[in-house]
Image: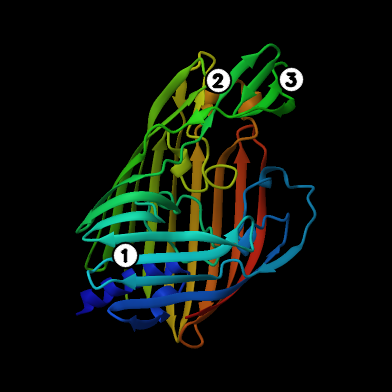
């Protein structure tokens, strides 16, 4: 009995991370003929105060963009929005087909409806858009920041896919998410990733078209299960990354992998963590670039596609204080290895690339009544670029969420 309780608590925590603390548990359910229908969602206010430079995105999430050179930035920025609010519909047909469509309002920078989920599922076969199979919420620490910690397991986003699940194992073919730093010589100019710079000075001189291409879907496989008070997940991904400029058609295969776990130490305390590694698939290394994925590969002076590696991880703990109150603390970090790209392309090309992103978050969450959550969170973000430029920022978040 105790084992079942611990397992249910772990799965509930993972579901909370996916749906934003309370999620679909309060769905409004009804029957329409022989169809079982559920309407769910929430209204949510997010507010932030950036003690240092303004690092806020829509939903008031913390951003790494511009963080490495923020010493002279203006201090003290407040903002609030309700863009994280969402609504979804789930239908179960008489034949046992599940259909789910869900959206929120983070589209186009905030305020526009954005499609999150749109898929059907029958007998373990899923077709449509939903969470990437190369991802897991098992090892995530509950945060108020919608984008959460760097180094979490896998993509942590949704993709169009075809997936088959049998027991704890699932495999998928997904819309690829490759990114490449391209390079070509044009007299005294150099084109890198669509940016034109002077070869001698490295100064910005304009933009050019990007010639990257996707020729194959991404292939993923994931194992996710639980045993007693332990829940765990592990996955691998392979995809092609390349370009075609009309004269040259080059590509390489990149891969990524992660492991994640959560352990219930007692009825009140859980610990969780993730580890990730990628080589040629940094677009799937969570929050490794300017804000999300870094480039997966680069094109050297000979026109060959060379992969870029990276790694990351997170660790956290959750404390259930009773009475609907909890405290969560977490740390995450990612690092990208730009050494080969710097040797081949020159320091001026990669100098401003993010080499390390990290974050510490701690929050207090309170559920005064069922389907209502309020919380406060402290964040400390850090970034260091390839050229040694670094910066950090302190942030405070507040959230209020009302589920239905």
For mark 3, what is the residue?
Answer: 201
Farthest-out residue, top: 187
Within the image, what quadrant is residue 174 found in? Answer: top left
- Residue in the foreground of this view, choosing between 268 and 259: 259
> Dot 3 surroundings within 10 Å: few (below 14), some, or many (20 or more)?
few
For mark 1, what is the residue?
Answer: 263
Residue at point 19%, 59% (across, down):
167
- Horizontal and vertical percent position of residue 141: 44, 63
* Mark 2 and mark 3 residues within 8 Å of each other at the beta carbon: no
> Dot 2 surroundings within 10 Å: few (below 14), some, or many (20 or more)?
few
- Residue in the foreground of this view, choosing between 389 and 248: 248
Q: Which mark is residue 343?
A: 2
Residue at point 36%, 77% (across, down):
37
Q: Is residue 399 above or below residue 125?
A: below
Is residue 138 visible to the viewer in this orientation of the structure? no
Q: Earlier in the sequence, mark 3 or mark 1?
A: 3
Is residue 330 visible to the viewer in this orientation of the structure? yes
User: In this image, 188 relative to 272: left or right?
Assistant: right
User: In this image, 22 relative to 338: left or right?
Assistant: left
Gap between marks 2 and 1, in whole Å? Answer: 43 Å
Q: Tag 1's secondary structure?
A: strand
């Amino acid at each position: 009995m105790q084992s079942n309780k611990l397992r249910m608590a772990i799965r509930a925590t993972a579901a909370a991370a996916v749906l934003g603390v309370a999620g679909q548990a309060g769905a409004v359910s009804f029957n329409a003929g022989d169809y079982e229908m559920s309407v769910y969602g929430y209204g949510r206010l997010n507010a932030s105060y950036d003690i240092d430079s303004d690092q806020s995105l829509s939903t008031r999430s913390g951003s790494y963009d511009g963080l490495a050179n923020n010493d002279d930035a203006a201090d003290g920025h407040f903002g609030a929005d309700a863009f994280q609010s969402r609504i979804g519909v789930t239908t179960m047909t008489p034949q046992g087909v599940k259909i789910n469509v869900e959206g929120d309002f983070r589209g186009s920078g905030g305020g526009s409806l954005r499609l999150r989920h749109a898929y059907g599922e029958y007998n373990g076969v899923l077709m449509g858009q939903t969470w990437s199979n190369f991802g897991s919420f098992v090892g995530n620490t509950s945060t108020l920041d919608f984008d959460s910690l760097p180094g979490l397991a896998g993509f942590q986003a949704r993709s169009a896919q075809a997936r088959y699940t049998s027991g704890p194992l699932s495999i998928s073919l997904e819309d690829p998410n490759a990114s490449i730093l391209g390079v070509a010589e044009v007299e005294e100019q150099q084109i890198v990733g669509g940016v034109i710079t002077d070869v001698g000075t490295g100064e910005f001189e304009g933009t050019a078209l990007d010639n990257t291409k996707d020729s194959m879907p991404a292939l993923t496989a994931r194992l996710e299960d639980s045993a007693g008070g332990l829940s765990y997940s592990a996955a691998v991904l392979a995809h092609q990354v390349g370009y075609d400029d009309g004269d040259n058609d080059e590509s390489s295969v990149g891969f990524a992998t992660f492991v994640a776990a959560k352990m219930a130490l007692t009825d009140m305390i859980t610990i969780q963590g993730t580890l990730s590694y990628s080589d040629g698939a940094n677009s799937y290394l969570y929050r490794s670039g300017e804000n999300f994925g870094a480039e997966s590969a680069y094109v050297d002076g000979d026109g060959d596609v060379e992969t870029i590696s990276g790694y990351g991880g997170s660790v956290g703990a959750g404390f259930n204080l009773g009475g609907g109150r909890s405290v969560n603390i977490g740390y995450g970090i990612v690092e990208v290895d730009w050494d080969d790209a710097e040797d081949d392309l020159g320091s001026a090309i990669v100098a401003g690339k993010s080499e390390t992103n990290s974050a510490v978050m701690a929050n207090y969450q309170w559920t005064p009544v069922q389907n209502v959550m309020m919380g406060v969170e402290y964040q400390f973000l850090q970034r260091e670029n390839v050229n040694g430029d670094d910066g950090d920022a302190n942030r405070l978040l507040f959230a209020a969420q009302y589920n239905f």
